[in-house]
Image (cartoon, rainbow, N blue to C red):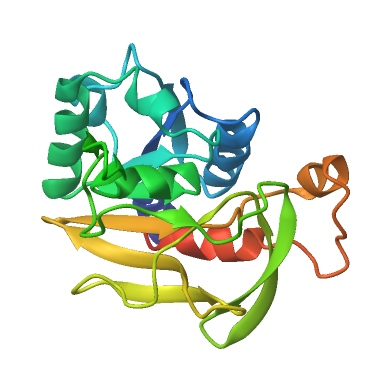
Amino acid sequence: MKRLAVLGLLLLSGLAQARTVAIFNGPGTCQGCPQTVASLFRAAGDRVVYVDQHTLGAKTLGKVQVYVQPGGSDDIDETLDVLRPGQVAALRRFVAQGGHYLGICAGAYLAAQYSDKAARRRAFGLVDIDELHAETADPAPSLLAIRWGATPRMVYNQSGPHLYRQPPAGARVLARYSATQRIAALSARFGRGQVLLIGPHLEADSSWYQEDGLSQQYGLNQDLFRQLIRTLK
């Protein structure tokens, strides 16, 4: 009886820790990006729901713990153009009230105050950074050297942003690009919630490398991605 009781508690504990994760799968996302991220969350035991410009809102966000804005096209306005101001406001409230925002590549760009500061084109405004810019001028997929903490890695990059050299007040630097020492990933607070931004694609699997003719001799970086998603609690 005791063993059964302990087993039941362990099972209930596991269920309690499972999260529901909303992943944006609408205009402006790149082919396969939402699905690759979803596979890694599911492997961690989480439930995944896809949202788009029709379903993103306070009602949907009220049922999830994590919101993911995955990689996308070279023009983040493709996403902003289809979202109503009320939807962006709902996303901001979700994070401010304790939700988690994970922005990867295009999703990191969208977390800034503006997509185009000169044109006063507002973005999500989740971090105290006016506007983000690409780490490299070449938009083609490539491998970039970063230092994740003290660990050097070669990561898949395609027009990924840098987050400048100095982080916003209260933010924690997770990784820097080796060539420039600019920030490649950081964790920040927005209200009671967490904002996790990543420039390169740590989630990239073997098929990404094969399709773009990139060497896999340095290995993948999905282990770093799995570590990160465990911090979204």
Residue 155 in the image, given as x and y percentages of width and height? 68, 63
Residue 12 in the image, given as x and y percentages of width and height? 35, 47
Residue 224's quadrant in the figure? bottom right
Q: Quadrant of the N terminus?
A: bottom left
Which residue is at the front of the view, 72 or 48? 72
Kindly identify the residue that appears in the image at 73 percent across and 48 percent down: 205
Q: Quadrant of the C terminus?
A: bottom left
Observer able to see residue 233: no
Residue 27 in the image, given as x and y percentages of width and height? 47, 20
Q: Is residue 72 above or below residue 218?
A: above
Q: Is residue 141 above or below residue 154?
A: above
Which residue is at the front of the view, 112 or 102? 112
Residue 121's quadrant in the figure? top left
Residue 31's quadrant in the figure? top right
Specify whether 131 is left or right of 201: left
User: Residue most toward the front?
Assistant: 118
Specify whether 62 is left or right of 222: left
Residue 88 in the image, given as x and y percentages of width and height? 21, 30
How many numbered marks, from 0 up?
0
Kindly identify the residue that appears in the image at 56 percent across and 41 percent down: 37
Which residue is at the front of the view, 161 or 63? 161
